Amino acid sequence: MQNAKLHSIQFNSIQFAFVLNLSRASSAVVLLYGGKMRCFFFKERSKSYPELETKSEKVLNGATKSTNSLPSPRSIKELYKEKEHNFRVFTLQELVDATHGFNRMLKIGEGGFGKVYRGTIRADPENKGDPIVVAIKKLNTRGLQGHKEWLAEVQFLSVVNHPNLVKLLGYCSVDSQRGIQRLLVYEFMPNRSLEDHLFSLSLPQLPFKTRLQIMLGAAQGLHYLHEGLEVQVIYRDFKSSNVLLDKKFHPKLSDFGLAREGPTGDQTHVSTAVVGTQGYAAPEYVETGHLKVKSDIWSFGVVLYEILTGKRTVDRNRPKEEQKLIEWVKNYPADSSRFSTIIDPRLKNQYSLTLARKIAKLADTCLRKNPEDRPSMKIVVETLKQALQDSESSNTSQDMTSKSLRSKLVRNGK
């Protein structure tokens, strides 16, 4: 089996796709969208990079560039062209060996489009150097379900570069008469996800300060996506299970299969099919399909309440009035005397109530109904930093007071 060279793809409008094996030398993908059918050809090669532009687009883009002298922000597809060579292209056999045949004992996660395995590879393609542990996502082989998301991950993760975004090390793309294989190889995150530590009984609980530090890192990652690139990126899938933790509990956003480029020019939103996880998606997006960068802000506010309460955003096992987290917390405003009753009891009062109130107020601004009234991610980052600094100052002051009191007691012989 050989790796496939993808010569063209209509990325943002794929509704259905399947592979036709034409011969040993080539194969094709037929894409159906808008009632029209378009066929794209694969040329088999041992190492290749997914190209994301059709011939018609090349002609159109060339004409646009020749008639418009003003520079415009490059799209993700254009930025991808510069970065594609940075990825390592794995053979399927390499990843089979890395996971011992995709042994179920090495499975560390599973989603709607496939499974994730822990594996070991050589850092050097020539099999030199020490082996490293990686995470390998293997898409389901039934048709091309998830293929669009696979392409999105390759595309976006080739462009982004930030300490709070997970690194994609390489991929494997194989087409044969036995079916398709689409795999992604990421850096391994040994401390699993924020979701696991918030809701799993088998893992140690995270201190409140650690929870906030994780959310600060996640906010910095989102801020980079929103404002740190030539093109605005809407993450569209912010939730606690997508915040992965490295060995030092530094957070990294993962799973970019649903990411989209933000609106350009005088556009106010991107129109798209509604996807995501129940309880995290912004209400205006669910109702209209209009995706804005402020949709990510809503999702961030939801997770802020998850770290405060230790409860999932939707939990059918709770009493009816508590099943929807965001509706339930409205009964306990941050400034009310009842607010402390919603704080995660597993924290055992080892937290600052003043700090918790500040975080709840920040969450409330993120959850405003009108998207334009929500803060930018830059403001969210600044607010979290200030809250953590104020907490540190308060702790230092309390420590100094305690030491002074102990000294007086010692001098008085008590």
Image (cartoon, rainbow, N blue to C red):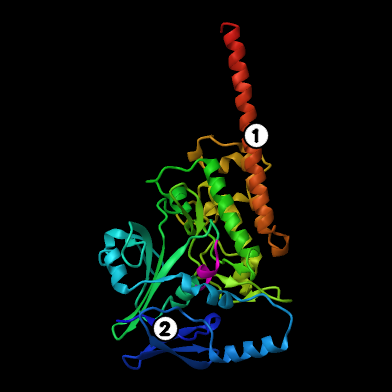
Q: Is residue 106 visible?
A: yes
User: How far apart are the two marked residues, 1 and 2, measured between alpha carbons?
Assistant: 56 Å
Q: Looking at the rendering, in which quadrant would you find the C terminus?
A: top right
Q: For mark 2, what is the residue?
A: 5
Q: Find numbered disc 1 in the image and state the secondary structure of the residue it sits on.
A: helix
Question: Mark 1, residues whose alpha carbon is within 10 Å: few (<14), some, or many (≥20)?
Answer: few
Marks 1 & 2, CB-CB < 8 Å contact: no
Mark 1 or mark 2, whichever is nearer to me:
2
The x and y percentages for residue 122 are 33, 62
Main secondary structure of the magenta stretch: helix
Residue 314 placement, left or right of 137: right
Mark 2: which secondary structure?
strand
Which numbered dot is residue 393? 1
Query: Does residue 157 show up magenta in the picture?
Result: yes
Image coords of residue 251 (percent x, y): 51, 53
At 36% across and 71% down in the image, what residue appears?
A: 90
- On the question of residue 109 being in view, the answer is no
**Vertical placement of residue 225 versus 329, above or below:** below
The magenta region covers 155-161
Q: Residues within 10 Å of mark 2 (few under 14, many from 20)?
A: many
Q: So how many labels did they put on this image?
A: 2
Which circle's residue, 1 or 2, is located before the other in the chain? 2
Instruction: Give left or right: position of 101 versus 51.
Output: left
Amino acid under disc 2: Lys
Image location of residue 296, percent across then percent down? 61, 63
Q: Which amino acid does label 1 sit on?
A: Ser
Q: Does the magenta stretch include residue 96?
A: no
Instruction: Classify residue 186 as left or right of residue 53.
Output: left
